[in-house]
Image (cartoon, rainbow, N blue to C red):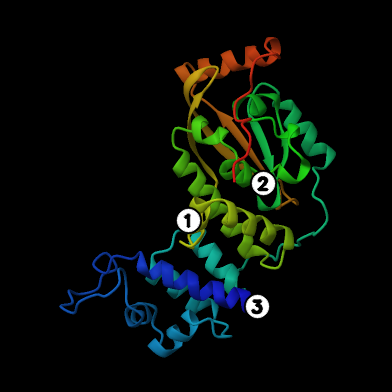
């Protein structure tokens, strides 16, 4: 719990620094603000708690806020759904049932693998804990990279995003995609702060990627539920894919990412062309397979 207390304090400090006082409904204040965002006493006032109590939360003191106080802090800080979930998780007052975390090697159950295989003509990724890549359709391998060709311990989406050269040229919006990967990993780490494999991954990425380290220090969280990716693919050119995520009932540690393109669009035509290549062009170079960099 000590790690969570420290992370809670760091998260609260970062969150209040990003709140515009005027948008938070505070009256004009002639005092000079030494740092951006809200002051501690302003967060405390908006949340209906004492400044001393809130200060002790930011200091990482061993305090257990009630669900009502956590909800009030979420409102005061203007947190989105991912931020609210993360804050509730840190203090252990989430209404959701506790996730049973297995420390064993994660594998897809046969039924899920068969389901993924049924999406043969579309890009689908199955990500597990800490964004480990558990499975990918042939189209996902052609669109992103062939994770099966990597050593098992390297088959991780966040690791690929930061430590391989391929994604930087593949994603037109690499910074947005990379930052979202960091924020998703922080949300994941908050659910099980004592997981050694997750902590090892974070330590490796912080040590090898200045960008990862910078964004990690922002203490932002993000829940990837849907969105889009803009790519410049070496074989089929520019395209945009939309994704939706599915979490199988009874398997909360696995998320399916299903990528599609609007029917009739140039992006759909590019995907169809890529699908034809996967069936006929086995000798052509694959995207995203550049060597790692330190």
On screen, 56 above or below 137? below
Residue under the image location 43 percent in, 75 percent down? 72
Taking 78 as reference, is 98 left or right? Answer: right
Secondary structure, mark 1, is helix
Q: Which sits earlier in the primary sequence, circle 1 or circle 3? A: 3
Q: Nearer the viewer, residue 200 or 143?
A: 200
Q: Classify mark 3: helix, strand or loop.
A: loop
Q: Which residue is painted at 73% across and 58% down in the image?
A: 197
Residue for point 49% across, 63% down: 219
- Judging by the rendered image, the residue that carries numbered circle 1 is 215
The answer for how far apart the CA atoms under marks 1 and 2 are is: 26 Å
Tag nearer the camera, 1 or 3: 1
Res 36 visible: yes
Q: Is residue 153 above or below residue 278?
A: below
Please report whichever mark, 3 or 2, sits nearer to the chain's N-terminal start.
3
- Given residues 82 and 201, the one toward you in this image is 201
Closer to us: mark 1 or mark 2?
1
Label 2: how many Cα within 10 Å (few below 14, some 14–19, many 20+): some
What residue sits right under mark 2 in the picture? 247
Looking at this rendering, what residue extends furthest in the front direction?
A: 294
Look at the numbered discs 3 and 2 and tell me whether their residues touch, using CB distance below 8 Å: no
Question: Percent x, y for residue 56?
Answer: 48, 86
- Give the secondary structure at mark 2: loop
Task: Find the distance from the CA under tag 3 to the CA under tag 2.
Answer: 27 Å
Name the residue tied to disc 3. 1
Residue 144, position as x, y percentages in the image: 60, 30
């Amino acid at each position: 719990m000590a790690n969570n207390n420290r992370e809670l304090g760091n998260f609260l400090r970062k969150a209040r620094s990003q709140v515009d006082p005027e948008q938070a409904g505070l009256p004009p204040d002639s005092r000079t603000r030494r740092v951006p965002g809200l002051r501690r006493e302003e967060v405390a006032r908006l949340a209906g708690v004492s400044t001393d109590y809130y200060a002790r939360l930011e200091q990482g003191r061993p305090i257990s806020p009630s669900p009502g106080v956590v909800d009030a802090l979420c409102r005061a800080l203007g947190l989105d759904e991912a931020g609210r979930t993360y804050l509730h998780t840190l203090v252990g007052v989430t209404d959701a049932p506790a996730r049973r975390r297995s420390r064993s090697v994660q594998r897809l159950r046969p039924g899920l693998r068969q389901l993924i295989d049924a999406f043969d003509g579309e890009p689908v990724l199955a990500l597990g804990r800490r964004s480990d890549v558990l499975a990918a359709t042939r189209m996902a391998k052609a669109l992103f990279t062939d994770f099966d060709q990597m050593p098992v311990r390297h088959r991780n989406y966040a690791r690929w995003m930061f430590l391989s050269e391929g994604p930087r040229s593949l994603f037109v919006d690499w910074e947005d995609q990379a930052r979202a990967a960091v924020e998703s990993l922080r949300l994941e780490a908050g659910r099980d702060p004592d997981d050694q494999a997750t902590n090892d991954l974070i330590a490796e990425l912080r040590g090898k990627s200045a960008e990862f380290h910078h964004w990690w220090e922002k203490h932002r969280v993000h829940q990837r539920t849907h969105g889009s990716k803009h790519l410049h693919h070496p074989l089929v050119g520019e395209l945009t894919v939309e994704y939706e995520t599915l979490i199988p009932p009874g398997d909360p540690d696995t998320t399916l990412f299903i990528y599609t393109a609007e029917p009739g669009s140039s992006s759909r035509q590019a995907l169809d062309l890529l699908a034809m290549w996967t069936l006929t062009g086995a000798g052509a170079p694959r995207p995203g397979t550049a060597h790692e960099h330190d």
